[in-house]
Amino acid sequence: MKASDMLKTKVVKIAFDAMNNKSEFLKKAGIVGILTTAICQITAVFINKDIPKKEKKFMLAQESADGIINFTIFWTLTAVCINKGRRLATDWTINKPEVFKNIEKTLVKEKGFDKYHIHKVKQGYIDGLGTIIGMIGSVTANNFVSPPLRNYAASLYQKKHIKQTVSQQDFENNLIFSKPAQQKSLTQHNSMSKFLNQSKYPGINPLKPF
């Protein structure tokens, strides 16, 4: 089979699965979009030669964390909402014969549906409400839940990064200035001791412990 034929077959299968199970397609398509975005952003930072090495390390970690948070929140919240929508559809209609009975009569009388097609209507109704609630969950995850969590995680990592950078700078400054500072302090100490020894209290040096 040619590559083009294999691609067409795969596309048709995905379209068929999406038509029969819209809620699962919503969830999987969202995950593919999130992963693709994260990979593109990480790659763009990684191949950019204008970004300094320390900043690139920080940005790569931040983009990776953003991708993980987006993936986790979207998958979890969307899946929960889809399952909740399906349960609501079942509890409101399917499990209440007095409610669905009139719908079933209408389908048989006006549409000529048999039991198989009535079953398909039930499944479509359950999946449809699951998809609607799942869409609400996906929008909530992407626009209201993930952003503050990403910002919080980024702030924690930024504080850690700044702390490490400042600590490294302090360490280097101490290496550079420690010896001259010690020499200056020792010189001042010796000068003060000499001055006091020449004062009206000969032989007493207040800087020397008793």
Image (cartoon, rainbow, N blue to C red):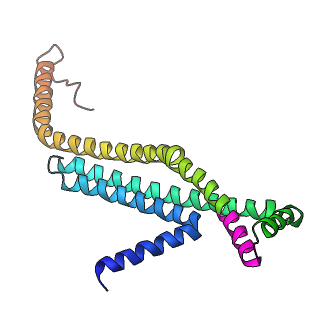
- Residue 23 in the image: x percent, y percent? 58, 63
- Left or right: residue 40 compared with residue 204: right
In this rendered view, identify the residue nearer to me: 193 or 145: 145
Quarter of the image with the N terminus is bottom left
Question: Magenta segment, principal secondary structure?
Answer: helix
Looking at the image, how many numbered discs can be counted on the residues?
0
Quarter of the image with the C terminus is top left
- Left or right: residue 124 compared with residue 180: right
Magenta extent: 113-127
- Residue at the outermost right position: 98
Q: Is residue 116 magenta?
A: yes
Q: Quadrant of residue 104?
A: bottom right
- Image point (40%, 43%), residue name: 155
- Image point (41%, 58%), residue name: 33
In this rendered view, identify the residue nearer to me: 148 or 87: 87
190 shown above or below 150 = above
- Residue 21 in the image: x percent, y percent? 58, 68
Q: Is residue 91 magenta?
A: no
- Image point (11%, 18%), residue name: 198
Q: Quadrant of residue 177?
A: top left
- Residue at the outermost bottom position: 1
- Residue 183 in the image: x percent, y percent? 10, 34
In this rendered view, identify the residue nearer to me: 178 or 140: 140
